[in-house]
Amino acid sequence: MSTHATVLQERIESGKAILLAEIHPPRNADPAPLRAAAKRYAGKVHAVGVSDNRDRVAMSALAAATLLKAEGLEPILHVTTRDRNRIALVSEALGAQALGIRNLLCTSGTHQTLGSYRAARNVYDIDAVQLLQSYANLASDCGLLGESGLEGAGPFCLGAVASPDADPPELQQVRLAKKMQAGAKFLVTQPVYDLERFEGWWKEITRRGLHEQAAILAGIQPLSDDPLAHAQAGPRRHPGIPDSLAARVSSQSDPGARRAAAIEIALETIRRLSKLPGIRGFCISADGDTEAALQIIEKSGLSVD
């Protein structure tokens, strides 16, 4: 098994801009949509994140990431602590490594009461910081499982999530620093909508020098698949959506116009955030609307150069 740096890790270490996309596995066992998406994204992004039952029950992220890798994409496997205890989480990492996947994004996961499986029990045996620590040290110290180490485990390129809209901001900054100290080499923010709040958050990030400790990418997600429904659901799922943005989308009577407005807002966000010193790139997610994500990439001028 390879122990060389992953393509994503090499890009991080180069100091160059990074462009990611995020793919949500299908709600069934059909691999065709993943293969089709892989062909669309080929050569347009540096790597593709694969969500782990974020707000739905879907094909396993590990299976989806393996299919995407077979199509030539560099996958980032999302691993959530909501659904697995520490034994299963370590097992997932070892399985991913065996399949040639060593980019892992560690997250606590969206609480099940915000998804379609509210009756399910969560696990949360450990949090995202502990998971990062465990994955970073699997080969030498697997104390989380009571093991001295698991020979041949890793190395992994580890990532995590940042939440610019979460409160209180001071504690969120501390938690972000802990994720970096635990081993995160890159961080992807939750989708950015409130630009003024993000810029205030970024000012504190740069003051603390956190942007120099890991590559921080801004999450971009248009208010779609159904822009109107997304805008209306925003206050619960994305509390950072300003009313003015929701109104720009919901005021359009035609579905095509609503979709166009959502894409334009995403493009405006990229243009403004691109001016921030130290921002390393973007992660584009369109919740299954591959065409919208690709339009954003093309019209924004983002590239893998």
Image: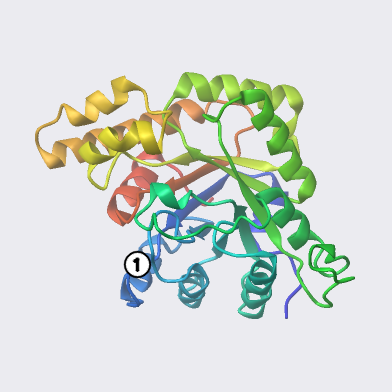
User: Position of 147 compared to 135: left or right?
Assistant: right
Residue 177: which quarter of the image? top right
Point 56% across, 56% down: residue: 82
Residue 230, image x, y percentages: 28, 39
Foreground residue, 75 or 104? 104
Neighbour tally class for label 1: few under 14, some 14-19, many 20 plus, Cα within 10 Å: many
Point 34% across, 55% down: residue: 116
- Quarter of the image for the N terminus: give it: bottom right
Residue 175 versus residue 21 in the image, above or below: above
Point 47% across, 59% down: residue: 51
Residue 264, image x, y percentages: 29, 33
Residue 35 versus residue 293 in the image, above or below: below
Residue 198, image x, y percentages: 52, 25
Residue 149, image x, y percentages: 86, 71
Check disc 1 and give the amino acid type.
Answer: Pro
Kindly identify which residue carries mark 1.
26
The chosen color scheme is rainbow
Residue 68 versus residue 263 in the image, above or below: below
User: Position of 171 compared to 281: left or right?
Assistant: right
Point 66% across, 80% down: residue: 98
Residue 45 versus residue 297 in the image, above or below: below
User: Position of 157 compared to 60: left or right?
Assistant: right
User: Position of 271 compared to 167: left or right?
Assistant: left
Disc 1 on helix, strand or loop? Answer: loop
Number of residue marks: 1
